[in-house]
Image (cartoon, helix red, strand yellow):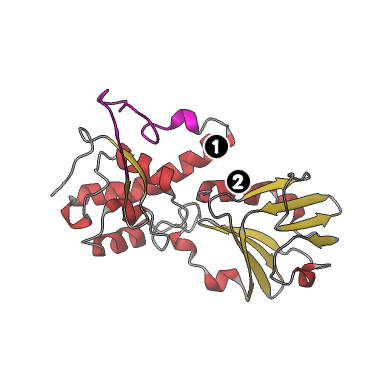
């Protein structure tokens, strides 16, 4: 599943189509795509893992799910969920969820929770996290109402970076560690963005799907943890289990 930084990159890559009229719309989406034919795209936005295509009075909310992909000025050899042709190119979306929503995303979304947004509010996130006393930190980082855009890779890497065991409860953490959790959830997301744009993202993974801890040189653990039972990679030696 693409994480927030990847959706920002998608938003940037399609910016050439902003303000353009849709000359042709196609695909197997059931949202009533004929409504989009001839419409002008007002803007592209991203919030967390949501890619938003904004029109006058309505917008499309696109979620890439686990296997969603896109192509710009080319097609894949598989059914297109939704595609657009413009005077200067084409955009094709695959294996994704698409919803047509009436209204304005600026009314519907809280940009202060988006870790990639310039409006990200660290103080607000800290205040919310501190209230989740009996929640495991692996679930806290995946909470899209606090850390919109943080996904499983970022979760693993942040917890390794701050040396916290993924099953720790928030109430067990020292305040210093809670502050680190919030700060690094934001910081790492932006590093992820720059690494991915430079095609060096995987080279910078320290714990995700690694068999050995780079700090301790000991074998790492792999478990499916949290409410979502997501793959979690960690070191039992240097990631402290606060109790």
Residue occupying image coordinates x 41% and y 56% = 147
- Does residue 156 appear left or right of residue 63 in this picture? left
Residue occupying image coordinates x 32% and y 25% = 214
- Does residue 225 appear left or right of residue 86 in this picture? left
Q: Is residue 78 above or below residue 30?
A: above
Residue 146 rendering spot, x and y as whole percentages: 38, 60
Residue occupying image coordinates x 52% and y 49% = 1
Q: Is residue 223 visible?
A: yes
Residue 151 rendering spot, x and y as whole percentages: 44, 49
- Does residue 190 appear left or right of residue 123 in this picture? right
Query: Which residue is most to the top?
Result: 217
Residue position for label 1: 196
Residue position for label 2: 9
Q: Magenta segment, which residues?
A: 202-223
Q: Is residue 237 magenta?
A: no
Q: Do labels 1 and 2 touch, CB within 8 Å?
A: yes
């Amino acid at each position: 599943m693409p994480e927030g930084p990847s959706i920002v990159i998608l938003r940037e890559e399609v910016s050439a189509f902003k303000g353009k009229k849709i000359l042709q719309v196609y695909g197997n989406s059931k949202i009533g795509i004929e409504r989009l034919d001839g419409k002008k795209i007002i803007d592209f936005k991203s919030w967390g893992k949501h890619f938003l295509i904004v029109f006058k009075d309505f917008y499309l909310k696109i979620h890439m799910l686990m296997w969603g992909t896109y192509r710009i000025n080319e097609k894949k050899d598989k059914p297109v969920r939704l595609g657009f042709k413009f005077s200067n190119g084409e955009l094709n979306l695959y294996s994704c969820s698409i919803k047509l929503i009436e209204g304005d995303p600026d009314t519907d979304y809280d940009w202060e929770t988006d870790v990639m947004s310039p409006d990200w509010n660290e103080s607000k996130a800290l205040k919310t996290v501190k209230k989740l006393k009996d929640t495991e930190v692996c679930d806290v980082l995946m909470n899209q109402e606090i850390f919109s855009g943080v996904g499983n890779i970022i979760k693993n890497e942040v917890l390794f970076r701050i040396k916290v065991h993924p099953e720790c409860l928030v109430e067990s953490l020292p305040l210093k560690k809670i502050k680190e959790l919030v700060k690094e959830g934001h910081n790492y997301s932006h590093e992820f963005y720059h690494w991915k744009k430079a095609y060096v993202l995987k080279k910078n993974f320290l714990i995700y799907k690694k068999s050995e801890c780079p700090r301790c040189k000991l074998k790492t653990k792999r478990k499916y943890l949290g409410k979502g039972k997501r793959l979690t990679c960690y070191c039992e030696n240097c990631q402290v289990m606060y109790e």
